[in-house]
Amino acid sequence: MKWNIEKNQPRWSEVKERFEAWWQRSSCGRPLMRVIARRDESCAAAGLPPPQSNEQNRLDPDYNVARYRNYMNSHYFMAEAFPNTTASLGPGSLAVYLGAEPEFAPSTVWYKPCIKDFAALELNFDKNNYWFRRHADAIRRQRELSDGEFFVGIPDLVEGVDILSAMRGPQEFCFDLIDSPELIKKHLTVLNELYHKYYEAFYELAKDDTPGNCYIAFEIWGKGRTIKMQCDFAALMNPEQFREFVVPYLQEQARHYDRRLYHFDGPGALQHLDAVMAIPEIDAVQWVPGAGNTPSGDEKWFWIYDKIKNSGKALWINFEGIQDYHEMVAVADKIVKRYGIDGLYLPFPEMSKAEADSLMLHAEQQWKQ
C-alpha cells in the first residue's frame, strides 16, 4: 500500500525525525509536541448515526474508518500530531485471545475471568481464536480503507501479570502469587512468548514503509517495533513481589523491541519506580496520576519526573485534567524550564485553532535551549 500520511500531516518526514530524537533523549529545537486543532465547523463532514452497539463502536472497521475520516476532516494535525486510529478490544486484549470473554461497555471492555486452576492451565498461540481473528480482520480492513492516509495502530495487548490477573480475577490472583509462585512464573514465561507472537501478527498488519509503527493509546511512533509496557496490578504487589514476578519478564519483553514506553498508572504503582528505572532497555516513561488526583503536570509529581530524567529515560507528560489554555501553557513552561527540551514529549489536548497557533508560536519562541 502506498503511504500518504502527508495528506493530513504535511510534515511527516520531519515528524519522524523529531520522534526519533525523542527516543534518543534528544530534540530538534523544541520539545516533541502533540497539537490537534479543531477546524471551523463548516469543514466537518456529515455526522454518523450513533453505533448500534458497544461492540460495533469498537470492532466495526467500516464504521470506525468513516468516523475517523470525519475527525480528520474537522481537525488540523499540528506539531508532531499524526492521524491514527485502531480497532480496540480494550486494554488487555491478549486475555481474550487466550480464553477470556469480553464484555463491551461504552468506554472500555471488561474481561470475564476464565482461569479456575493454574495447575490445569495451558496457554497456546491460537490463530483460529474467534476474537483474535475478528480483531486482526478489523485492523486489516481498516488498513485497506485508510488508503495509507492514516495509521492503524498496534492494539493494546498488555502483558504479563496484568493478563493473568484479568484471566483469573485480581483477588484470587493475589493468593496465587503466595500459594503457587513457581507455577505463576512458568505461565509468565510462556505468556511472554505468546505476547511476541501476537504482537508480530499485528505488526505485520500495522507497520508502515519506514518500517515502523504507532501505538494508538499513547500517540507514539517509532522505527522498528514500538511498544507500550505496563503492570497496573503492581499497585497490589509489594516491592519484593514486583521484582520477582514482574521485572524479569519486563526485561525479557523489552529486549525484543526497538522503542519501549513504560506506562505507570496511579500512586500505588510508584513504590516500584526505582525497579522499573533500573531496566536499561526502557526508553521512556509516562505517568498517570489516576482518578481523584491532581493532573500529571502538577509540581507535586515533579519528584517522579526527576527520577525518570535522572535515570536517563525520556519523559511523556500530558495535561489531562487542565481545562484552561493559559493554565496549561503555564504548567508546560514550568516543565520545560525544569527538564529542558531533550527527551521531553508534551501531548496537549485538542484545542481551538487560535490556541494551537498561539501555542506553536510560544514553543518556537520560548522553548528553545
Image (cartoon, grey):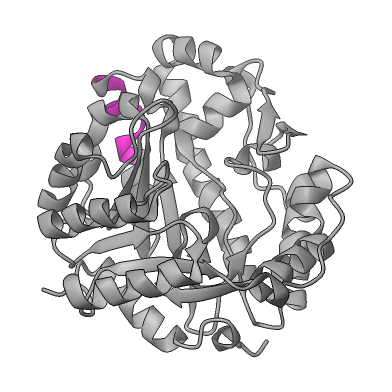
Residue 19 image position (x, y, % from top left): 34, 73
| Magenta span main SS | helix
Horizontal relation, residue 100 to residue 38: left or right: right
Name the image quarter holding the C terminus.
bottom left
Nearer-the-camera pick, 157 or 306: 306
**In the rendered image, the vertical position of residue 101 relative to residue 6, given as above or below:** above
Looking at the picture, tell me which residue is in the foreground, 283 or 183: 283
- Where in the figure is residue 95, as x and y percent of width and height? 63, 37
- What residue is shown at x 51% (from left), y 16% (from top)? 173
Residue 226 location, quadrant:
bottom left
Residue shown at the point (42%, 41%) measured from the top left: 321
Residue drawn at the location 58% of the way across and 41% of the way down: 91
267 relative position to 145: left or right: left
> How many marks on residues?
0
Estimate the x, y position of residue 30 in percent, counting from the top left.
Answer: 23, 74
**Picture residue at 54% right of the left edge, 33% below the top:** 163
Q: Is residue 32 magenta?
A: no
Magenta region, residue range: 240-248
